[in-house]
Amino acid sequence: MDSEDRFVNIELKLVHQEDLVESLNQRVYEQQKQIDMLEDLVRALAERVRTSTLANQTPLNERPPHY
């Protein structure tokens, strides 16, 4: 194996590495978008639960309706 063959092999490996890095970067980007969407959903659900809980609370000293 001469120097030219070694150089070509190194170039091929570099091209494959660059493709892999680009593919991984794209996947990380997609996952971050999904994480952001899920965080927004959790925030909205937490707010909905909080406001629904506050709306349904009765004063602590109030007797239940069956009394």
Image: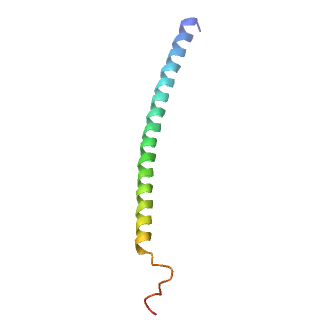
Q: Height in image: 65 above or below 13?
A: below
Colour scheme employed for the rendering of this structure = rainbow
Name the spot of residue 16 as percent of width and height, x first. Answer: 49, 24
Q: Residue at x 46, y 87 (%)?
A: 64
Q: Height in image: 16 above or below 47?
A: above
- Between 58 and 15, which is closer to the camera in this rendering? 58
Name the spot of residue 9 as percent of width and height, x first. Answer: 53, 15
Name the spot of residue 59 as percent of width and height, x first. Answer: 47, 78
Residue 30 left/right relative to 17: left
Q: Residue at x 45, y 29 (%)?
A: 22
Can you name the residue that lies furthest to the bottom here?
A: 67
Can you name the residue that lies furthest to the top here?
A: 3
Count of numbered circles in the view? 0
- Between 41 and 52, which is closer to the camera in this rendering? 52
Name the spot of residue 12 as percent of width and height, x first. Answer: 50, 18
In what quadrant of the picture does the N terminus appear?
A: top right
Q: Height in image: 22 above or below 60?
A: above
Can you name the residue that lies furthest to the front here?
A: 61
Can you name the residue that lies furthest to the right here?
A: 1
Q: Residue at x 43, y 46 (%)?
A: 36
Q: Residue at x 54, y 15 (%)?
A: 10
